[in-house]
C-alpha cells in the first residue's frame, strides 16, 4: 500500500509492501493515480533498467514512467510482470495512451529510502517534484 | 530555532558553529512573522545543508519567500568559488530557468473595456496550458539545436532579446550535453506554459512607487500588462534528472559527503561539472526561447482582439530567471551563484542592465499568488553587498497542495475570482485550487522585507484582471 505525505511544495510517496518487487508495483499504482485516467488504445512497454543500488532503481523506475507519460502520453495501469535481480529490473507494464492529467516533473533523491524492515516487510520513501 | 542570531529586525543568522559540517553561516531575510512560518517547515535545515557544500563562500542565504524544497530550499542562494567549488543541479532545480517575463500593452484598462474577456480567451487559445501539453508547428531537431545554443536570438524581436536577462542566451551552452530524452521531452513543448504554479496573467498597473523607474520601464498608471511565468518544461526537468544521477554516482570519486543526497554535486571544473553547466545553459536558453514563443503568442492574441497596432506596440519590459546558476564576479572573485527560487537584482550602473534601465537598476518581477498583487522591483546596491546580487522570487508557498485543496474547492475559487472581476481560464479545477492564494505567504510582506534589507525597491504594483493557468 502507499500513501502521500504532506510536503510544502512537492509530493512525498511512502510505500509499504510485502516484497521488494511489490514496492515497485505499488509505486506504479501511485504514479498512475497522479497521471489520471481517460480513454485511449492499450499500450504495453517492456522495461529494462539498472542501477547500483535498489533505491536508485526505484528512482529509475519512476523516472521511466515520468518520461513515458510525457514523451508518449502513456498512462500506466498495472505491472504485468516484474523481475528484480542484481540491480536490474525487467518489467512488462500495461496501460494506455491518454492525456496524463497531473504530470510529475521529476523524481528526486531527497529523503530517498528503500529497505526491508524488522517485520520482514519492505518500506520505501521517495519525493516527487510536481 | 535556538541557533538563530538576530542581526537586525529583518536579518537572522545561524552561525557556522551550529553544525560541524557547515562551512559558512546561513542567513535568513525575514521579519518575525515570516520567520515563524519559515521555522514551520524544513527550510532552515535545508539552508544549513547548503552551507556544507564544498567551495561555498561567505554565507548561504534564504530569501523571505523561502520554503522547504528538496536539497536546496526554494528561495535559496549560494555562491561557490571557481574553478573548484561545486555545481549542484539540485541547487538550480528541475525547472531550469523557470522565470518571469513582463509585457506592457499600449493601452489602459479603461480602453480595454469589454474586450478583456475576449483577450483572455484568445491568449488561452494561443498558449497551451497544462502538464505535458504540446504546441502545433513544433520545431524540428535542427531548430532545437539552434534554440539550445542561442535561445530566442534567432527568432525573437531584437528589442525583446535586449530586454532579457543575459540577452536570453547563457554562454557555454552545448546542445550535445543535452540527452536525447531531454530533447524528446522538450521539442514539442516550445511555447507551452506547463502546470503547477505556471501562468499567464493579464493585469493592470494599480500603483506606482517610483515614477522615474516606472517611466523608464514603460509603465504608467492603469496600463494593461501581461506577466508570463514558465520555464524549460520537460527538457529542463530531464537535464536535471540526468545530471543529478551522474553526480550522485561521481560523488565518492570526488570525496564529497553530503547531508542530503539531492544536493549531489561535483567540482565545476570536473568533467561532470562542466557537462552539467553546458547542458544547464542550453536548457536555460530553451526556457528563454519558450517565454519568447509565449510572448509572440500573446501578441498574436492581442492582434486578433485589439488590432495589429496594439500588438506592434506591446513592449517587453524585461525577462528574469529565478532557477539558474551563473558565473559572476564579486570582490575580484569569480563565483558560481546558485539561485533556486531567487532572482538576480543588479543595482544601477551594472553593465548587465539594458542601457535604457541602467541608471535605475535591473527590473525584477515578483508574482504574487493567483488573484493577488504582483510587483515590479528594481535592483538595489544591498543585493551586491549582502546577497550575491539577488532578491526574492515570489510569495513563497505556505501550505501543501493537499492542505490547500482541503481549505478551498477549485469551483469555489473560480467563482470568487470571477466575483472580483478576474476572468479565469484553466483546464484543471483541481490545479486551480492547489494554487489558491491561501497556499502562499503574503507577497506584500515578502516585498517589504527585501526593500528593508536593501536588496531591491518597489517600482510598481500590478493586479490581475485575467488568469490563464496550467
Image (spheres, coloured by chain):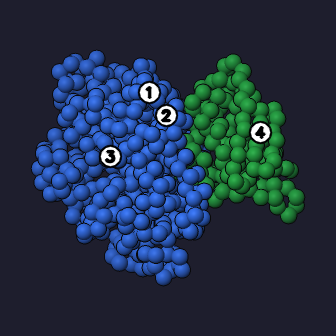
Chain colours: A green, B blue
The chain ID associated with circle 1 is: B
Identify the residue shown where x is 79% and y is 50%: A86
Residue bearing mark 2: B183
Q: Quadrant of residue B14?
A: bottom left
Q: Is residue B297 above or below residue B275?
A: above
Marks 3 and 4, how far apart at CA: 40 Å
Q: Foreground residue, A121 or B364?
A: A121
Identify the residue shown where x is 44% and y is 79%: B15
Identify the residue shown where x is 63% and y is 24%: A98
The chain ID associated with circle 2 is: B
Residue bearing mark 4: A90
Residue bearing mark 3: B170
Is disc 2 in the same subunit as disc 4? no
Q: Foreground residue, B449 or A69?
A: A69
- Please tell me how crowded label 2 is: few (under 14), some (14-19), or many (20+) other residues with Cα within 10 Å: many
The chain ID associated with circle 3 is: B
First reached walking from the N terminus: tag 3 or tag 1: 1
Amino acid at each position: 500500500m502507499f500513501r502521500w505525505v504532506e510536503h510544502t511544495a512537492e509530493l512525498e510517496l511512502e510505500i509499504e509492501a510485502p516484497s521488494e518487487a511489490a514496492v515497485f508495483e505499488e509505486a506504479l499504482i501511485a504514479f498512475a493515480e497522479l497521471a489520471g485516467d481517460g480513454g485511449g488504445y492499450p499500450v504495453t512497454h517492456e522495461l529494462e533498467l539498472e542501477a547500483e543500488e535498489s533505491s536508485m532503481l526505484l528512482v529509475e523506475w519512476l523516472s521511466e514512467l515520468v518520461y513515458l507519460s510525457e514523451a508518449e502520453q502513456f498512462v500506466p495501469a498495472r505491472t504485468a510482470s516484474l523481475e528484480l535481480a542484481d540491480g536490474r529490473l525487467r518489467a512488462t507494464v500495461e496501460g494506455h495512451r491518454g492525456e496524463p492529467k497531473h504530470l510529475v516533473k521529476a523524481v528526486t533523491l531527497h529523503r530517498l529510502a528503500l529497505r526491508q524492515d524488522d517485520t520482514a516487510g519492505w518500506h520505501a520513501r521517495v519525493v516527487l517534484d510536481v | 530555532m535556538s541557533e538563530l542570531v538576530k542581526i537586525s529586525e529583518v536579518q537572522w543568522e545561524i552561525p557556522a558553529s551550529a553544525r560541524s559540517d557547515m562551512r559558512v553561516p546561513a542567513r535568513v531575510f525575514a521579519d518575525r512573522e515570516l520567520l515563524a512560518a519559515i521555522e514551520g517547515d524544513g527550510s532552515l535545515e535545508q539552508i544549513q545543508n547548503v552551507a556544507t557544500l564544498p567551495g561555498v563562500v561567505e554565507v548561504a542565504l534564504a530569501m523571505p519567500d523561502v520554503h522547504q524544497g528538496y536539497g536546496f530550499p526554494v528561495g535559496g542562494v549560494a555562491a561557490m568559488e571557481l574553478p573548484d567549488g561545486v555545481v549542484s543541479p539540485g541547487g538550480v532545480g528541475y525547472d531550469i530557468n523557470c522565470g518571469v517575463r513582463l509585457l506592457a500593452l499600449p493601452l489602459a484598462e479603461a480602453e480595454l473595456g469589454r474586450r478583456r474577456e475576449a483577450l483572455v480567451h484568445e491568449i488561452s487559445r494561443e498558449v497551451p496550458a497544462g502538464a505535458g501539453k504540446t504546441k502545433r508547428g513544433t520545431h524540428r531537431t535542427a531548430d532545437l539545436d539552434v534554440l539550445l545554443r542561442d535561445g530566442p536570438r534567432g527568432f525573437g524581436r531584437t528589442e525583446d532579446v535586449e530586454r532579457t536577462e543575459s540577452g536570453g542566451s547563457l554562454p557555454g551552452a552545448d546542445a550535445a550535453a543535452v540527452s536525447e530524452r531531454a530533447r524528446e521531452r522538450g521539442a514539442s513543448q516550445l511555447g507551452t506554459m506547463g502546470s503547477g504554479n505556471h501562468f499567464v496573467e493579464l493585469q493592470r498597473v494599480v500603483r506606482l512607487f517610483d515614477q522615474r523607474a516606472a517611466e523608464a520601464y514603460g509603465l504608467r498608471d492603469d496600463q494593461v500588462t501581461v506577466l508570463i511565468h514558465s520555464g524549460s518544461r520537460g527538457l529542463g526537468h530531464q537535464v536535471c534528472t540526468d545530471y543529478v544521477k551522474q553526480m550522485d554516482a561521481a560523488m565518492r570519486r570526488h570525496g564529497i559527503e553530503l547531508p542530503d543526497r539531492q544536493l549531489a554535486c561535483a567540482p565545476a571544473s570536473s568533467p561532470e561539472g562542466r557537462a552539467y553547466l553546458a547542458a544547464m545553459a542550453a536548457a536555460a536558453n530553451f526556457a528563454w526561447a519558450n517565454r519568447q514563443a509565449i510572448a509572440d503568442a500573446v501578441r498574436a492574441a492581442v492582434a486578433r482582439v485589439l488590432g495589429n497596432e496594439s500588438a506592434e506596440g506591446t513592449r517587453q519590459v524585461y525577462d528574469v530567471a529565478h532557477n539558474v546558476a551563473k558565473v559572476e564576479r564579486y570582490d575580484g572573485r569569480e563565483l558560481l551563484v546558485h539561485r533556486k527560487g531567487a532572482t538576480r537584482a543588479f543595482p544601477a550602473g551594472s553593465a548587465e542592465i539594458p542601457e535604457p534601465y541602467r541608471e535605475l537598476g535591473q527590473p525584477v518581477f515578483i508574482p504574487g499568488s493567483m488573484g493577488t498583487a504582483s510587483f515590479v522591483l528594481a535592483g538595489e546596491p544591498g543585493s551586491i553587498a549582502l546577497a550575491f546580487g539577488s532578491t526574492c522570487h515570489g510569495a513563497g508557498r505556505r501550505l501543501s497542495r493537499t492542505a490547500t485543496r482541503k481549505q478551498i474547492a477549485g469551483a469555489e475559487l473560480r467563482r470568487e475570482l470571477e466575483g472580483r472581476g478576474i476572468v479565469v481560464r484553466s483546464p484543471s479545477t483541481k490545479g486551480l485550487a492547489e494554487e489558491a492564494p491561501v497556499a502562499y505567504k503574503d507577497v506584500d510582506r515578502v516585498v517589504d522585507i527585501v526593500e528593508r534589507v536593501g536588496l531591491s525597491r518597489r517600482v510598481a504594483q500590478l493586479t490581475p484582471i485575467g488568469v490563464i493557468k496550467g
